[in-house]
Amino acid sequence: MDLKETYKFLLCGDSISRGVIFDESKGKYIILKDNYASILETKIKGIIFNAARFGNTLTKGISKAANEIIKSHPDIIVIEFGGNDCDFNWNEVAKNPSINHLPNTDFDTFEKTLTDFIISTKRSNITPILLSLPPIDADRYFKWISENDESKKNNILKWLGSVNKIYWWQERYNSAIIDAAINTNTRWIDIRGAFLKQPDYRNLLCIDGIHPNKEGHRVIADKMLEFTKANYAYLLK
């Protein structure tokens, strides 16, 4: 990457990168002011164009990213997807626990699409950096999707077999991210590892068990700054 006085960063991802948290006092999702992207922007030489959106899957997110790339001409693109891709339509699961249900993005499609996107960004002379997924709290997330409804809870559990399968399934998609990075010789930031090093990573998550809270966003920001200092120190102020 050529040395410059200022750089353009494009952030592609879902609600985590958008800075969405669940505010228990308000009983709704809000945008955290001090999210990891806003913290980073105070430390780097440049501007972050945040194309992350609540509910984004990989396919949906990169289709939107294409326009953002044309508009912003980024030097670096940070890619954070997987949480929505590995998720299921839990209402449908609860209604029909005896049939097969597919995730929002099937595993093979996720890995191939991510790999293709990485390759295309490199061909456009953009440096891609991947983020691994923060771990989820399976128990808390199971309660969240069950909505305190015993019938729904029992049906979802009937289909799952075990609540622990939620953690395992998300871990599979995290492994796909790492594999895509290795196979394309692309750098990735171990966000998951940063969470798991904490005494209890669950304290870094919102009540829904999936969105990092304010403390979680600080951990993400710190890990990204640590990575940047080690690999791209010239990007820091």
Image (tube, rainbow, N blue to C red):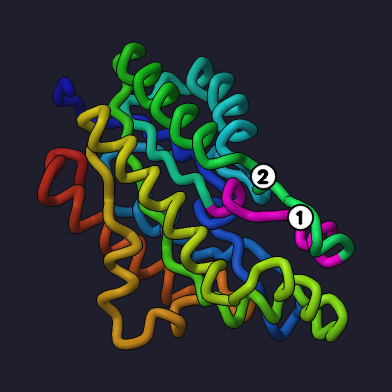
**Residue 32, position as x, y percentages in the image:** 57, 65
Left or right relative to 58: residue 22: right
Question: Magenta segment: does it hold 215?
Answer: no
Left or right relative to 96: residue 1: left
The residue under label 2 is which amino acid type? Asn
Q: Mark 2 packing: few (<14 Cα in 10 Å), some, or many (20+)?
A: some
Residue lying at 63% horizontally and 72% vertically, measured from the top left: 161
Assess whether mark 1 and mark 2 are in contact (beta carbons under 8 angstroms): yes
In front: 14, or 50?
A: 14
Mark 2 vs mark 1, CA separation in Å: 8 Å
Left or right relative to 64: residue 212: left
Place residue 181 in its image quadrant: top left
Residue lying at 19% horizontally and 58% vertically, measured from the top left: 226
Question: Magenta segment, which residues?
Answer: 83-94
In front: 100, or 171?
A: 100
Question: Magenta segment: does it hold 84?
Answer: yes
For label 2, the residue is 104
**Residue 72, position as x, y percentages in the image:** 47, 23
Place residue 29 in its image quadrant: bottom right
For label 1, the residue is 89
Residue lying at 60% horizontally and 31% vertically, measured from the top left: 59
Residue lying at 86% horizontally and 60% vertically, measured from the top left: 96
